[in-house]
Image (tube, rainbow, N blue to C red):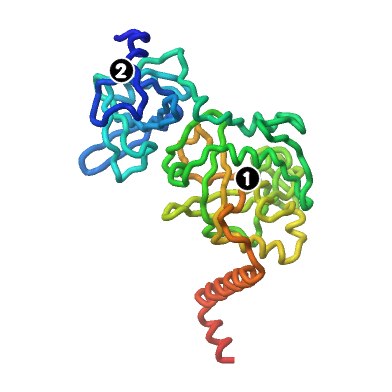
Amino acid sequence: MSTETELAKQSVLINNIPKNSADWVMPVLVIRRGSIIPYKNSRHEGTFRTIILVDEEGTKIQATLFNKHIETWKDSLKRNKSYYIAKGWLDSINPNYSSVHKEVELTFTDNTIIQETAHAVSTHKFSDGFLSLEHADKLPNGSILGRFGISTIPVSNVLIKPMFQIVMRRAIEVTLDNILDGLFADLEDCMYKFKATIEDILNKDEPWYSSCKKCHKKVRYIEDTATCNNCNSQNVEYEVRYCLRLEVCDGERRAKVILFEAAKYILGCSVQEYIESSSVKYRKLVLSKAKQFDFLVRIDMNDSNPRRSLIAEEIHQAEDEAPITMDAEVKSVRMYKEEGQEKHRRSCPNQTKETKSQ
């Protein structure tokens, strides 16, 4: 096997490697190590694992391991570790599948060499000094983050943290496709943002739930007593929390997004204020349908099912969306009413006929 010094001298960046070539050495950082997934088609059956790599310029490339190669390198290609990869095959992407690189993807062969290096691939050129939400949340009020100061101020009776807006701007931008296919930069404790249109509000009539104060799981009522199955306790203390469920889309791809405290960004008030409010707040919720928003989410890197419901920590209407006018509000509410009436007519045809005859 070549020494690390020899591999370093032969190293080239991803975009400098010719297509359909194998005579190169690639220094990369593993930013995502996918789960082992079974597959079956008319010609083959087996398992595969997707690995996402990035070089010091920020260029990402996707590698897929099949069957025996998964076992061969089970102790290699670990997340957040740097490696020299040699004698792989750089092939054109399959247009039928998503890929992080526009033109090429990496294929491993029996001759491929993978050697871990203590010289970590630097992410400085493309990380843009990103600060994780958890780190930012620990900074004291008034701290300086780049050119921005962090403070906590009340706005319209809702506690809004400008820090979150900073994180939204600094979060890694991906597409809904990337998230659903599990193809995104897998960096430790990182936030991601994507644009999507709210297609439907799944629980618009009651976007809240009774939450155990200790674990925030939903409580059940048994003979007027609040019971938390998660805590295995009866007569627990509970509170009402937002749990707004949305169906969003970006082109043909759809996903479910859950908003807990982030629902305040749409509704502009606490959950208690929303419950006690007039229909104005409800209309505001209705108006968000068919509008495009920026969603800020944290991805659980240990979750093998990226298609599950996403939990948004922040949501903002896209800047290029036209502001909502009163005419649009009236029209939107009327549309919701008409949809409800039409559903009622379809579900109760006999009652509809009797009403018309009267």
In percent of width and height, residue 156 lies at 77, 53
Looking at the image, residue 121 lies above or below residue 283: above
Left/right of residue 206 with respect to residue 249 in the rendered view: right
Left/right of residue 120 with respect to residue 151 in the rendered view: left
Residue 103 falls in which quadrant of the image? top left
Residue plotted at (44% across, 27% down): 57
User: Which residue is farthest left?
Assistant: 43
Q: Amino acid at mark 2?
A: Ile
Looking at the image, residue 331 lies above or below residue 114: below
Residue located beneath label 1 in the image:
314
Residue 8 falls in which quadrant of the image? top left
Q: Earlier in the sequence, mark 1 or mark 2?
A: 2
SS state under label 2: strand
Residue 284 falls in which quadrant of the image? bottom right
Q: Amino acid at mark 1?
A: Glu
Label disc, if present, on residue 66 of the rendered structure:
none
Q: CA distance from mark 1 to mark 2?
A: 43 Å
Left/right of residue 248 with respect to residue 70 in the rendered view: right
Q: Nearer the viewer, residue 181 or 14?
A: 14
* The C terminus, quarter of image: bottom right
Residue plotted at (62% across, 38% down): 167
In percent of width and height, residue 275 lies at 74, 58
Q: Nearer the viewer, residue 186 or 9?
A: 9
Circles 1 and 2 in contact, beta carbons < 8 Å: no
Q: Nearer the viewer, residue 199 or 22?
A: 22
Label disc, if present, on residue 113 of the rendered structure:
2
Whether residue 232 appears in this view of the structure is no
In percent of width and height, residue 134 lies at 64, 31
* The N terminus, quarter of image: top left
SS state under label 1: strand
